[in-house]
C-alpha cells in the first residue's frame, strides 16, 4: 500500500499507484516534446546550411562555366584578367563550401541522432503503459497490447538511447545551472573581452584595407550578439528555473527506467562492456562551453541558494 502521496515525482515507487503513473506519464510527455522540439530545431539548422551549401555550389558551377567559356579566346589579354578574378573568387568559395558542408553534416547528424532519442522516449512512454496495465494489472481504463519482448539487440539500442538521454540532460542541466549561478555571465564577459581585444588591435590598422573592414564588421557583430546574451531579465531567469525543475523531474524518471532496464539486462545476462566511469561518459557528451564553465566559480547570486534547495542530480 502506498497510500496518498504528495504530487511530487520523488515519490515514484517500483510499483506505482495510478496517481504515480499519471506523474510518470506527465513527465514523459514533456520529455518527448522537449526532444521533438530540439529535433525540429536541428532540422531547420541542417536545412539552412544545406541551402547555403547549394548557393555556394551553384556559384562555383557558374565560375567553372565562365572559365570554360574563356577557352575560346586564347590570345586575348582580357582573358587573363578574368581568369585571375574568377580563380580568386573560386578560392574563397572553396573555404565557404568546406565550412557549410561541415555544418550541414553536423546538424544533419544531430537531427538523425535526435530522432533516435525521440524514438527512445516514445518507447519508454509506451513501455510504461504495458508495465502498469499488463504486469501490475492496474486499472487504468485502457487496453495495451503487450509488445514482444526486446531482443538483445533492441535492448542494447534502447539502453544506449537511455544513457545518451541521461548524459545529454546532465549537460543541459549544467548549462542552466551556470546561467543562474553567475558562471554563464562570467563566460560571456570573458568572451566579450576576447572580442574587444581583437577589435582594439584591428582598429590600429589602415581602415581602408578590405580585410580590416571585413574583420571589424564580423567582430562587431559577434560583440553585439554576446551583449544581447548578457541581458538578464526576470522572465529569462524564471524560464531557466523552470527548465532546471523540469530537468530534475526528468532525471528522477530516467533513474526509474534505468532500474527497470537493469533488471531486463540481468535476465539476459548482459554484461556492461563500457569500463568508463560515469564522469568520463558525461565528459564526452559535454560541450566545450559547459566544460569551460565547470572551471569557473559560482557567484553568490540570489538564485544560487535556490539551486542548492533543488537538490539537482
Image (cartoon, rainbow, N blue to C red):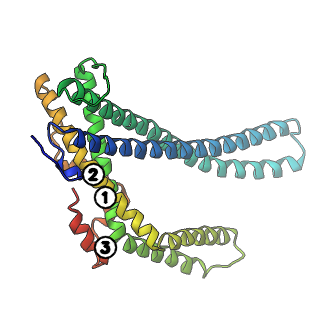
Say if mark 2 contacts mark 1, CB within 8 Å. yes
Image quarter where the N terminus lies is top left
Q: Which mark is residue 303?
A: 3
Residue at 62 percent across and 46 percent down: it is: 94
At which x and y percent is residue 301?
A: 31, 78
Left or right: where does residue 98 sit relative to residue 116? right
Q: In this rendering, does residue 143 appear at all? A: yes
The residue beneath circle 2 is: 249
Label 2 to label 1: alpha-carbon separation: 6 Å
Residue 108's place in the image compared with 150, above or below, is below
Could you tell whether 268 is left or right of 302 in the image? Answer: left
In-front residue for pair 26/110: 26
Other residues around mark 2 within 10 Å, as few (<14) / some (14–19) / many (≥20): many
The residue under the point 41% across, 43% down is 35
Q: Secondary structure at mark 2?
A: helix
Query: Is residue 290 something that shows in the picture?
Result: no
Above or below residue 305? Residue 9 is: above
Which element is circle 1 on? helix
Label 2 vs label 3: CA separation?
19 Å
Give neighbour class at mark 1: few <14, some 14-19, many 20+ (Cα, 10 Å): some
- Kindly indicate whether the residue at mark 3 contacts the one at mark 2 (C-beta within 8 angstroms): no
The disc, 2 or 3, on the residue closer to the chain's N-terminal end is 2
Q: Nearer the viewer, residue 238 or 288?
A: 238
Q: Which residue is mark 1?
A: 245
Amino acid at each position: 500500500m502506498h497510500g496518498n502521496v504528495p504530487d511530487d515525482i520523488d515519490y515514484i515507487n517500483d510499483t506505482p499507484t495510478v496517481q504515480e503513473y499519471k506523474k510518470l506519464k506527465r513527465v514523459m510527455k514533456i520529455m518527448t516534446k522537449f526532444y521533438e522540439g530540439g529535433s525540429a530545431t536541428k532540422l531547420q539548422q541542417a536545412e539552412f546550411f544545406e541551402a547555403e551549401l547549394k548557393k555556394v555550389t551553384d556559384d562555383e558551377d557558374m565560375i567553372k562555366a565562365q572559365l570554360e567559356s574563356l577557352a575560346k579566346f586564347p590570345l586575348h589579354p582580357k582573358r587573363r584578367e578574368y581568369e585571375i578574378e574568377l580563380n580568386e573568387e573560386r578560392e574563397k568559395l572553396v573555404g565557404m563550401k568546406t565550412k557549410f558542408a561541415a555544418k550541414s553534416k553536423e546538424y544533419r547528424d544531430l537531427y538523425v541522432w535526435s530522432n533516435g532519442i525521440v524514438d527512445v522516449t516514445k518507447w519508454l512512454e509506451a513501455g510504461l503503459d504495458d508495465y502498469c496495465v499488463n504486469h501490475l494489472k492496474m486499472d487504468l481504463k485502457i487496453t495495451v497490447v503487450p509488445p514482444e519482448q526486446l531482443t538483445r539487440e533492441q535492448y542494447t539500442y534502447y539502453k544506449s538511447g537511455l544513457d545518451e538521454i541521461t548524459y545529454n540532460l546532465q549537460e543541459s542541466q549544467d548549462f542552466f545551472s551556470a546561467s543562474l549561478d553567475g558562471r554563464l555571465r562570467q563566460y560571456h564577459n570573458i568572451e566579450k573581452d576576447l572580442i574587444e581585444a581583437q577589435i582594439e588591435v584591428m582598429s590600429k590598422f589602415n581602415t581602408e584595407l578590405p580585410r580590416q573592414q571585413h574583420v571589424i564588421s564580423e567582430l562587431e557583430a559577434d560583440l553585439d550578439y554576446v551583449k544581447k546574451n548578457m541581458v538578464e531579465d526576470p522572465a529569462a531567469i524564471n524560464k531557466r528555473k523552470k527548465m532546471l525543475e523540469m530537468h530534475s523531474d526528468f532525471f528522477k524518471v530516467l533513474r526509474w527506467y534505468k532500474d527497470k532496464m537493469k533488471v531486463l539486462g540481468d535476465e539476459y545476462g548482459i554484461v556492461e562492456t563500457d569500463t568508463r566511469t560515469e564522469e568520463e561518459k558525461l565528459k564526452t557528451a559535454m560541450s566545450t562551453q559547459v566544460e569551460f564553465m565547470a572551471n569557473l566559480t559560482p557567484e553568490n547570486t540570489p538564485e544560487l541558494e535556490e539551486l542548492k534547495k533543488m537538490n539537482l542530480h
